[in-house]
Image (cartoon, rainbow, N blue to C red):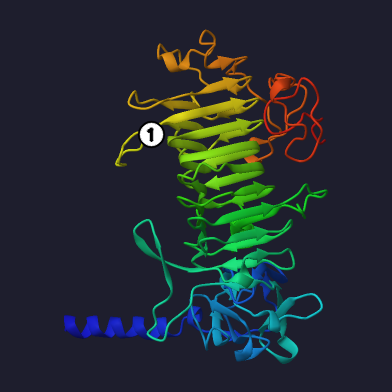
């Protein structure tokens, strides 16, 4: 008897639950609401997939509804693709009978991969729409993407499925040597590089003012032995930096504008020669510039900005560098690391580091390299004139001196952050006149906005008019004339924008 009543009760409950209105839906009546009426997928390069963008769809009625169709206007030929409430539909283009509960919402995620030929030839926009239902109940959300044309450079792919490689640092890395007709980079349209593009021995890669180079993940530029790089940027007159040469990643969406580590490095390899860099901006690399031992020709670096490097802004090993009007910020290690000896002269440079987590000092100088043979090499010169060395650490200068090799250094009229009292003879800033002259210690330079890489100063800065005329570079990093006595750092003081 008990079993009979138990089964009877369960049957009643099942019958009742099967009739609940939660599981009944009515057809959509075209009253959906949306988080936006147009989804802009930002700018992408031709044939490179976009980021994923979202649209939220709301059922504001008190009834559970079924949307008969959700589809892209161009159907299966659309270059957009979607997931709707976790479902992929037909090739991500067409979805049928989508349920949306009363007073509930769902997400649609949208991506695109389109070629320049898919875009409107007048404005290079690729457009489509998400269509909800049809007929009198039809509702649309527009989709818009700007497709940017580019020159693509990449390794060859062989018939067996393998790709061309280069020997880099003892490893085979995806890469290729630039052909003769690929050594001149113009400002006609951007370049997108996959893998490491290498300048062949005896050749020179030249970058015209205004050229733009975008590197894919794990890509970079290698300047081989006896090869050269000439970067010929110039002063720009607008915020678009129309004459600056810019190296950055290939993701153009604003979400990626300040994300470190999107690509590899610019590698001036051992034996590369006569390298010259002027008005270059490097963003979001693993290491901005990696400069190895050279044939005693100077690497000239002028009017250059390097931001958001996972490791170093500039990593030099037994190199020879003459730097003027350089700005470096945000590096996971040091902004500037001059290791394993070498010869360095930096004038009117601003070295800063405000990496969000623990980092090394902003500037590191050493005449040794762990694991190298020999482990030490002579540092014949490390001279800093009219420079700023600052950041978020207590101490922002590290001098790692081995007695087994020469260690020659000098700081003239520099602002340095080094707050700890030290008996180390390398850091006697006020009494050691052999190595330090006119040093300003631990005074905030009051940059306009360091977190946004705006290192301008005004007359309230402790770096104002503290430079030595003997070391002056007549023009600052953006072409303004320096006054006498000059300000410290890469920028001539100006009133801040209001």
Q: Can residue 143 be seen in this view?
A: yes
**Quadrant that contains the C terminus:** top right
* Image quarter (top left, top right, bottom left or bottom right) of the N terminus: bottom left
Tell me the residue at 31%/85% (across/down).
11
Number of numbered discs present? 1
Q: Quadrant of residue 65?
A: bottom right
339 left or right of 477 in image = left
Q: Dot 1, crowdedness within 10 Å: few (<14), some or many (≥20)? A: many
| Residue 177 x %, y % | 51, 68
Please indicate, yes or no, whether residue 58 appears anywhere in the rendered image: no
Residue under pointer 1: 377
* Relative height, residue 57 to residue 230 (above, below): below
Residue 80, percent from left and from top: 61, 80
User: Where 90 sits versus 455, above or below?
Assistant: below
Determine whether the residue tagged by mark 1 lies in a helix, strand or loop.
Answer: loop
Asked whether 274 or 238 is in front, the reply is 274
- Which residue is at 71% across, 78% downward? 126
Residue 133 is left or right of residue 216, and the answer is: right
Q: In this view, does 73 lie to the left or right of 105?
A: right
Q: Residue at x 69, y 20 (%)?
A: 462
| Residue 253 x %, y % | 63, 62
Residue at 64% x, 67% y is 191
**Drawn side of residue 422 relative to residue 39, left or right:** left
Looking at the picture, tell me which residue is in the foreground, 461 or 157.
Answer: 157
The quadrant in which residue 51 appears is bottom right
Foreground: 261 or 34? 261
Percent across and percent down for residue 16 are 40, 83
């Amino acid at each position: 008897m008990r079993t009979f009543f138990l089964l009877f009760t369960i049957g009643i409950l099942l019958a009742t639950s099967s009739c609940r209105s939660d599981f009944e839906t009515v057809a959509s009546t075209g009253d959906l609401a949306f988080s936006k009426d147009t989804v802009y997928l930002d700018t992408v390069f031709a044939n490179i997939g976009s980021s994923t963008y979202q649209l939220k769809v709301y059922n504001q009625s008190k009834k559970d509804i079924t949307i008969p169709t959700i589809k892209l206007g161009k159907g299966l030929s659309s270059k957009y693709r979607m997931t709707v409430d976790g479902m992929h539909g037909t090739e991500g283009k067409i979805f049928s009978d989508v349920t949306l509960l009363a007073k509930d919402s769902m997400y649609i995620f949208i991506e695109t991969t389109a070629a320049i030929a898919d875009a409107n030839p007048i404005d290079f926009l690729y457009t489509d729409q998400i269509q909800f239902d049809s007929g009198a109940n039809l509702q649309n959300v527009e989709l818009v993407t700007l497709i940017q044309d580019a020159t693509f450079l990449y390794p060859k792919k062989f018939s067996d499925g393998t790709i061309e490689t280069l020997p880099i640092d003892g490893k085979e890395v995806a890469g290729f040597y630039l052909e003769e007709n690929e050594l001149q980079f113009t400002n006609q349209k951007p370049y997108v590089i996959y893998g490491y593009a290498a300048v062949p021995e005896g050749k020179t890669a030249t970058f015209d003012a205004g050229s733009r180079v975008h590197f894919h993940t794990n890509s970079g530029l290698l300047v081989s032995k006896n090869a050269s790089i000439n970067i010929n940027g110039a002063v720009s007159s607008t915020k678009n930096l129309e004459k600056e040469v810019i190296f950055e990643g290939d993701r153009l969406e604003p979400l990626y504008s300040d994300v470190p580590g999107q690509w590899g490095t610019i590698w001036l390899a051992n034996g590369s020669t006569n390298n010259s860099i002027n008005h270059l901006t490097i963003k979001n690399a693993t290491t901005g510039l990696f400069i190895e031992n050279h044939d005693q020709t100077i690497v000239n670096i002028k009017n250059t900005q390097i931001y958001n490097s996972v490791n170093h802004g500039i990593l030099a090993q037994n190199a020879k560098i003459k730097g003027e009007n350089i700005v470096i910020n945000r590096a996971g290690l040091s902004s500037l690391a001059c290791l394993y000896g070498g010869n360095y002269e930096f004038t009117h440079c601003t070295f800063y580091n405000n990496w969000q987590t623990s980092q090394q000092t902003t500037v590191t100088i050493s005449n040794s390299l762990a694991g190298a043979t020999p482990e030490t090499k002579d540092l014949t010169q490390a001279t800093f004139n009219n420079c700023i060395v600052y950041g978020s650490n207590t101490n922002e200068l590290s001098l790692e001196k081995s007695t087994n090799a020469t260690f020659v250094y000098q700081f003239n009229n520099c602002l340095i952050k080094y707050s700890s009292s030290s008996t180390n003879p390398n850091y006697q800033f006020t009494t050691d006149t052999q190595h330090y002259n006119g040093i300003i210690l631990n005074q905030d330079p009051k940059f306009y906005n360091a977190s946004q890489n705006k290192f301008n100063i005004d007359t309230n800065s402790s770096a104002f008019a503290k430079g030595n005329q003997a070391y002056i570079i007549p023009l600052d990093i953006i072409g303004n004339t320096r006054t006498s006595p000059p300000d410290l750092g890469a920028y001539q003081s100006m009133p801040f924008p209001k």
